[in-house]
């Protein structure tokens, strides 16, 4: 009986580690993309990049991070000294017995001083 409990405990730990192995990369990549969005909003409130150029840069960064993002999912608004960036995407994760869709909405807004 003690051996069965030990094997069950090991199985639970291994299963938990596997779930973390599947879930951490999308969250980590989302964190990195959010950091990039914040940075782009700050930097582009002081330069002359167009909304299209900012959007293309964001999509390129998303592709580097394996984030499925298209031009229609990224909204960039530049009016005067203010830059607002928002995006919306979903990542499907095939967890054992319960696949889930993780929904992310990175956004940032910056106004020049």
Image (cartoon, rainbow, N blue to C red):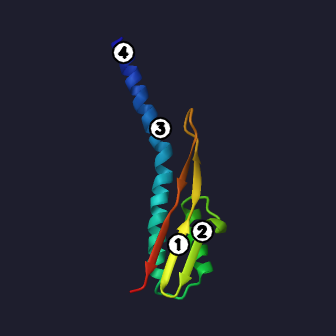
The reply to whether dot 2 and dot 1 touch (C-beta < 8 Å) is yes
Residue bearing the label numbered 4: 3
Between discs 4 and 1, the one toward the N terminus: 4
| C-alpha gap between disc 3 and disc 4 | 23 Å
Q: Secondary structure at mark 4?
A: helix
| C-alpha gap between disc 3 and disc 1 | 34 Å
Can you tell which of label 4 and label 2 is closer to the viewer?
2
The reply to whether dot 4 and dot 1 touch (C-beta < 8 Å) is no
Considering only vertical position in the picture, is 26 above or below 59? above
Residue bearing the label numbered 2: 74
Find residue 27 and name its label.
none
| C-alpha gap between disc 4 and disc 1 | 55 Å
- On the image, the x and y values in percent for residue 45 come to 47, 83
- Quarter holding the C terminus is bottom left
| C-alpha gap between disc 3 and disc 2 | 32 Å
Residue bearing the label numbered 3: 18
The residue depicted at 39 percent of the width and 15 percent of the height is 4
- On the image, the x and y values in percent for residue 16 come to 43, 35
Q: Secondary structure at mark 2?
A: strand
Between discs 4 and 2, the one toward the N terminus: 4
Q: How many marks?
A: 4
Residue bearing the label numbered 1: 85
Between discs 3 and 2, the one toward the N terminus: 3
Give residue 94's quadrant in the image.
top right
The residue depicted at 55 percent of the width and 82 percent of the height is 78
- On the image, the x and y values in percent for residue 5 come to 37, 18
| Label 3 crowd bin: few (<14), some (14–19), many (20+), radius 10 Å | few
Can you tell which of label 3 and label 1 is closer to the viewer?
1
């Amino acid at each position: 009986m003690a051996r069965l409990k030990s094997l069950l405990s090991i199985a639970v730990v291994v299963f938990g580690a596997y779930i973390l192995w599947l879930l951490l990369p999308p969250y980590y990549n989302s964190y990195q993309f959010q950091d990039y969005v914040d940075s782009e909003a700050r930097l582009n409130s002081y330069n002359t990049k167009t909304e299209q150029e900012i959007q293309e840069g964001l999509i390129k960064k998303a592709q580097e991070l394996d984030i499925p993002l298209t031009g229609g999912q990224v909204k960039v608004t530049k009016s005067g000294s203010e830059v607002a960036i928002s995006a919306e995407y979903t990542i499907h994760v095939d967890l054992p017995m319960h696949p889930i869709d993780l929904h992310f909405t990175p956004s940032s807004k910056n106004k020049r001083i």
